[in-house]
Image (tube, grey):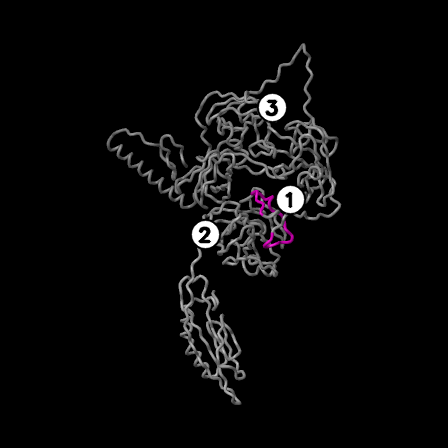
Amino acid sequence: MRTPSQSHPRAVIAHTAVLLPVLIGLLAMSVLSASVTGASLTATPSPPLSSTPVPSVTPTLSLTSTVTLTPTVPTETLTPSPTITVSLTITPTATETPTPMATLTVTPTTSPSLTPSATSTPVPAAPGDVVINEVYYNPPQTGNEAPWEWAELYNRTDRPVNLDGWSLADNVSSDALPAATIAPGHFLVVAASPSFHDNFPGFSGPTIFVADGKLGNGLANSGDRLLLRAPSGLEVDGLSWGDDAAVFDLPCPTVPAGHSLERMPFGQDTDSAADFRDQAHPSPGAGVLAPTPTPLPTPYPATVWLNEFLPAPRDVDWDGDGKPTEDDEWIELYNAGPETVNLGGWQLDDEEDGSRPHVIPPGVGIAPGGFRVFYKRDTGVSLNNAGDQVRLLYPDGSLADQHAYEAHPGYDRSWSRTVDGGGTWTGGYPPSPGASNQPPTPTPTRRPSTPAPPPQPQRVSIAQARALPPGTKVTLEGAVTVPPGVLSESAFYLQDAIAGVRVYIRHGGPPELALGDRVQVSGEMGRFHGEVEVQVDEPGRVTRLGAGEPVTPMDIRTGNVGPGYEGMLVRITGQVVGLYKSTLDLDDGSGVARAVFRELTGVQRPWVEMGELWQVVGVVGRISGEGGVLGPYRVFPRFASDVSRVPLGLPVTGGHVGRLGRVAGLNLGLLLAALVLLAETRRRRAGTLVPIRKPLRRGVLAPSDGEDAVG
């Protein structure tokens, strides 16, 4: 709502024309107060003064004998417009009872023309340009907390960002943001309502308020999400917490009342919950440079030890991101005590003045007798190959455990304790991240006169091989469903009529293979981050038997994506119920399944709308999160053609199209059934024998030649 000083000049002229007779009448009646467009004017008799009116630049409320109103032209007016200046002079007489005399003068003037300024063309937003830097979803108020909730945005770019057309959404609804501009490297608070100032009365930074008094549908304390969208609909940023895994597979932990979730350091964006910390002292409009460890009561538990670490990765993809790099370095901790230990605030570091210490996020625990693995990609702690120091620090910075080494253990070899949590350190044990340290299997001594034949690999099916223990040598055959270099630089996938499996080449580049190629593989069974795989020493153990037809994906329900289909090429169909930068959630009524678009494939998540029916083909697998925690099973598409939209109304195997789709499919099925009956009637009348299809199930289309049945 505009104030009188902001009113349009034409409106001022209209108001003045109406008020002139009112003012004259009020002066005649000696009324000492007048109302002009919402502003109160009070005239009080005063001693005789000069009758010469004194001009004023802005509207003035005066207790002297001169009152002048000069409306201000709004800055957005770009054409000349007249300004009406009203001068009211009150001259009291020198009698015992002063009687004011009024002179009313109307002087029209013309304001100068305004030249419109150039409007810059906005640059389209990209993911990460503006981030949600802090979320205050759990205010200390009781009952309906929504009016006190707020979020803080941060402009990470070197240019201003205009938020006109942008929106914030939770898991239910979306709010259009008022027009505002965030300067480069600055913050903006988006508050649900002016009640924001109840908890932060001294805050005076840039703030905007949403129209309905709540962010989304009101942010849930037990679990929710917050998404920032550009005018194009692009999700520029987002986060989830508690029991909502829509944005992060491992959501941010919940925070107590009065706390916030804040990026530490501010602006950091790795698309993971590790970017956020529990902030006990929320700071709207300001960022935090580094996380402050939450103080823990002393003494700290003395049951957590450094147990194993690998400083020199080379050929093995230890962290499971699809390629072996120096970020595959890892450090393993072991809890020898009888109780779970909260590692929040503890630190991992190399020697002093080396890498920056990694502060373990709040909520990360280690079970009694359990292990925790931390990869360099998450910690940033870099260990020298030929000599360094590994240190575990308590939250107060004091030393919990350390080990110094002065020799290179060998590539993809680890330093480990001979006994978990104790014993001495050795470089002779095989690496075992997340598992107990074990000595190498001794090689039996054989007499030269009676050499025993080397063990021959078992010739088994893929399903039989998956049931064998790690280390068992096998030979199996299958068709290539994922060639090397698609989901992993050093691995590919095979499948036979019953099961599928991942094949990993330990040394040397993978062979040239294409979809459908028949392949024989000889190796030993193993596991990688919980997924069964065949580990092959070198490419010569992979034999191409010939070309073949690409494997047809198996249609399954979205709720069945799990260990029963691990390593298999499947197809799921369902309605879009969730999406993020590199994920797509589908549900056919049996449960939600997530498709994950791996960076190595080069496949981007397509533009979709909530509620649309989509189909995804991919391999079922899983990835590990921070600390080696295994995530849920996902579907990993291989190519852009693996993802397609399904027209609403066509019945699809395993699909869930809602009531409208079921009705459309039923009507179409009944129509086809009627056409078949009509053809049969004509055939009988003509006395000819015309082959027809078998009767259709109600609501199911018969497949045409060369196409899969859709049901």
* Proximity of marks 2 and 1: CB atoms separated by less than 8 Å: no
Give the residue number, with chain letter if any, for mark 1: 361
Of the numbered discs 1 and 3, the one sitting upstream in the chain is 1
Residue 425 located left or right of residue 709: right
Label 1 Cα crowd, 10 Å radius (few <14 / some 14-19 / many 20+): many
Q: Amino acid at mark 2?
A: Ser
Q: Position of residue 43 (x, y in %)?
A: 51, 79
x and y, in percent, of residue 197 in the image: 59, 60
Numbered mark located on residue 472 in the image: 3
Q: Is residue 673 above or below residue 18?
A: above
Q: What is the span of residues highlighted in magenta in the rendered image?
A: 267-286
Measured Cα–Cα span from mark 2 to mark 3: 67 Å
Identify the main secondary structure in magenta: loop
Q: Is residue 169 magenta?
A: no
Q: Residue type at mark 1?
A: Pro
Q: What amino acid type should be assigned to the residue bearing mark 3?
A: Thr
Q: Is residue 282 magenta?
A: yes
Q: Is residue 145 left or right of residue 211?
A: right
Q: Element under label 2?
A: loop
Q: Which residue is mark 2?
A: 120
Spatial CA distance of label 2 from label 1 is: 42 Å
Helix, strand or loop at label 1? It is loop
